[in-house]
Amino acid sequence: MKTRAAVAFAANKPLEICDIELEGPKAGEVLVEVKATGICHTDYYTLSGADPEGLFPAILGHEGAGVVVDVGPGVTTLKKGDHVIPLYTPECRQCKSCLSRKTNLCTAIRSTQGQGLMPDGTSRFKCDGEPVLHYMGCSTFANFTVLPEIAVAKVREDAPFDKICYIGCGVTTGIGAVIWTAKAEAGCRAVVFGLGGIGLNVIQGLRMIGAEQIVGVDINPSKKEMAEKFGMTDFVNPKEVEGDLVPYLVNLTDGGADYTFDATGNVNVMRQALECCHRGWGQSIIIGVAPSGAEIATRPFQLVTGRVWKGTAFGGARGRTDVPRIVDWYMNGKINIDDLITYKLPLECINEGFELMHEGKSIRSVVEF
């Protein structure tokens, strides 16, 4: 069949809108009609050429929502007509990682997914007879895509596609970092570095669990109003702080934060986030993706005295299990997604969405098919 897609033929080049040949689902796979997809910083990271695992040509996009239109042999948990969210972090529920209950990092299809291929080692996409690679196992910048059954979360049918697509990455990553990675508790003090799409979701995750103090740190003062709407109690612009930022934040949080979250991808900020944690028990969660080859550093004393550095992917969420719950939270009014969707665009204007993100003018642009 034919599908319309935005194809990345090379790094640092605009996406090209093309008609692509799409092979139907094989065993254990489903065909999904994508109704809406968010444009995420991770897509930009790969397109920029900074991603060491970036492969081309590929159909990017990993933050989508749509409807199952066909299923391959052996599929038992999904059927035609199901509303779904693709998962770049699958949940097979059978591999060592899934069975351990210690991580959400399922390894069932990791090797082929990292090569831009389906589990059988081939691509379902072709352009002019030549293979086009999948991206993060999702490729939601196409109005039809094929996914493994284990990489799809079934969700309720009354949830709007243009909102819940954001749960496919940004919402879950931010809120999940609070709930499943940090396991933050009511009454805690927290500092969030970077008040973009991820940071705002960290803030609303902290508000959900009843944090007493939520400090937002950003060099852009225009971020303050939106962050306060999501639950931030204190705003700090590092450019306005005299001297070292770390002791300022330690003082502001009464001896240091119980939890800090880096949503910037800046390794210097990651160090600040760790070092403003409370002595003895503070946890610092790294969410942001740093440039290829970057390294983090701190004095061992910071860790010896009880601070903990942790990383998180997809907020520690188990996709097929937790994503439907987050959709319910949105539909029940527990979390705010509507205010985070700042632009809606047709597929033909997808490059404009990347420009808006790069210029800092959007929290999340959504492409509707």
Image (cartoon, rainbow, N blue to C red):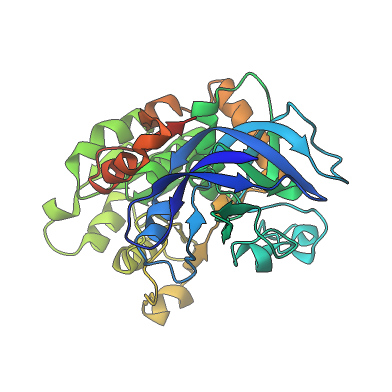
For residue 120, above or below residue 252: below
Q: Does residue 315 appear to the left or right of 54 in the view shown?
A: right
Q: Residue furthest bottom?
A: 300
How many marks can you see? 0
Question: Which quadrant holds residue 275?
Answer: bottom left
Whether residue 358 appears in this view of the structure is yes
Q: Which of 366 and 262 is in front in this view?
A: 366
In the image, farthest residue toward the front: 128
Looking at the image, residue 123 lies above or below residue 115: above
The image shows residue 268 at horizontal and vertical percentages of 29, 68
Give left or right: position of 244 versus 67: left
Task: Residue 126 in the image: state x and y as whole percent.
Answer: 59, 54
Q: In which quarter of the image is residue 255?
A: bottom left
Q: Position of residue 70 (x, y in %)?
A: 76, 35
Give the vertical position of 58 relative to 84 (above or below): below
Residue 24, how many percent across, how many down?
Answer: 72, 44
Which quarter of the figure has residue 289?
bottom left
Residue appearing at x 54%, y 43% in the figure: 140
Q: Which residue is drawn at 80% across and 32% down?
A: 79
Name which residue lies at 49% across and 69% down. 53
